[in-house]
Amino acid sequence: MAKHQWLTPHQKGIVRRYYEHKDDIAHQKLSEIVSDLYLCTDEGRAKGLWKQVRTALVNAGVHEHKADRVTQERNLDELARIVSEIF
């Protein structure tokens, strides 16, 4: 945030609620990506989704090594298991 720039009370409430529900947001995002991967038939689209998986897993608190392993193997069953375990 720039110097001398403050948030209004309304904006502070929005930011606070976002961080209160950050885990729910991460779970929803990962669940949507898993669903999209199950239905995806285009290899280019799948490649982009797997990149999103790694980022979303790290943001959800999964160790980077584990996130890298799952995305490199492109193991969808393992991904679904991890998502169900962390939330």
Image (spheres, grey):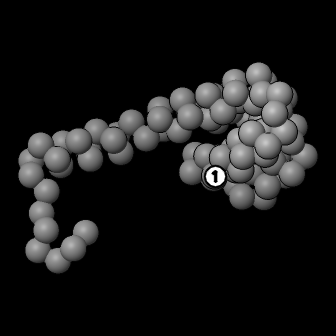
For the question of whether residue 25 can be seen, the reply is: yes
Quick check: 65 above or below 49?
below
Q: Residue at x 74, y 39 (%)?
A: 45
Q: Is residue 1 left or right of residue 21?
A: left
Most extreme residue toward the right is: 73
For the question of whether residue 87 can be seen, the reply is: no
Q: Residue at x 57, y 51 (%)?
A: 59
Q: Where, by quadrant of the figure, is residue 1 drawn?
A: bottom left
Quick check: 22 above or below 6?
above
Residue 20 x, y percent position in the rendering: 34, 40
Residue under numbered circle 1:
55
Q: Residue at x 62, y 35 (%)?
A: 30
Residue 73 x, y percent position in the rendering: 90, 46
Which of these two is toward me, 41 or 53?
A: 41
Q: Amino acid at mark 1?
A: Thr
Most extreme residue toward the bottom is: 3
SS of the residue at dot 1?
A: helix
Q: Where, by quadrant of the figure, is residue 17 drawn?
A: top left
Q: Is residue 41 left or right of residue 86?
A: right
Look at the image and tell me in which quarter the C terminus lies: top right
